[in-house]
Image: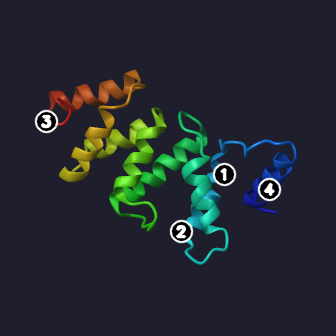
Amino acid sequence: MSLYSDYLAEIEKRKTQGLHPKPIEDCALVRELIAQIKDTRNEHREGSLNFFIYNTLPGTTSAAGVKAQFLEEIIRGDAVVAEITQKFAFELLSHMKGGPSVEVLLNLALGDNAETAKNAASVLKTQVFLYEADTNRLETAYKTGNALAE
């Protein structure tokens, strides 16, 4: 049985208890969701998209790390998902509020693509949970003349 099937079974069990689906915090399940999203003919693609977008925990969970990395792939154009545009991917990153999402936003803001960097910097300005490592990256970029780091 797959992690996805296990998750669906758990959802059904929780329904009988009057509970909503549990948020996803396991990176392995998110990886399975992404595989099903990438397979445009997968029978679980729509459900996987929904769970990826709305049920994956933000913050510093392992699931958030995998989600942020996939959103970065979409923004860079390395992965194409019709339902998740570059703009929507930035929006999803903005709601994650820290941890892996900030790392991805910094990667993009300090990267070579000027338009992507500008968009990432705009989202990064709204984030409140930056760690010392994040501010150190910004400081280093600023000292080396990166205009967006300013």
Question: Which label was assigned to residue 147?
Answer: 3
Q: Which residue is mark 2?
A: 38
Residue type, numbered disc 4? Asp
Q: Are marks 3 and 4 in contact (CB under 8 Å)?
A: no
> SS at mark 2?
helix
Q: Quadrant location of residue 1? A: bottom right
Instruction: Classify 10 Å Cα crowding around label 3: few (below 14), some (14-19), many (20 and above).
Output: few
For the C terminus, the quadrant is: top left
**Is any part of residue 113 visible from this angle?**
no
Q: Which residue is mark 4?
A: 6
Mark 2 → mark 3, Cα distance in angstroms: 36 Å
Q: Quadrant location of residue 110? A: top left
Going from N to C along the chain, the mark reached first, 2 or 3, is 2
> SS at mark 3?
loop
Going from N to C along the chain, the mark reached first, 3 or 1, is 1
Residue most extreme to the front: 18
Residue type, numbered disc 2? Lys
Residue type, numbered disc 3? Ala
> SS at mark 1?
helix
- Depicted 45 relative to depicted 8: above or below: below
Residue placed at 82% from the left, 46% from the top? 14
Question: Which label was assigned to residue 133?
Answer: none
Going from N to C along the chain, the mark reached first, 4 or 2, is 4
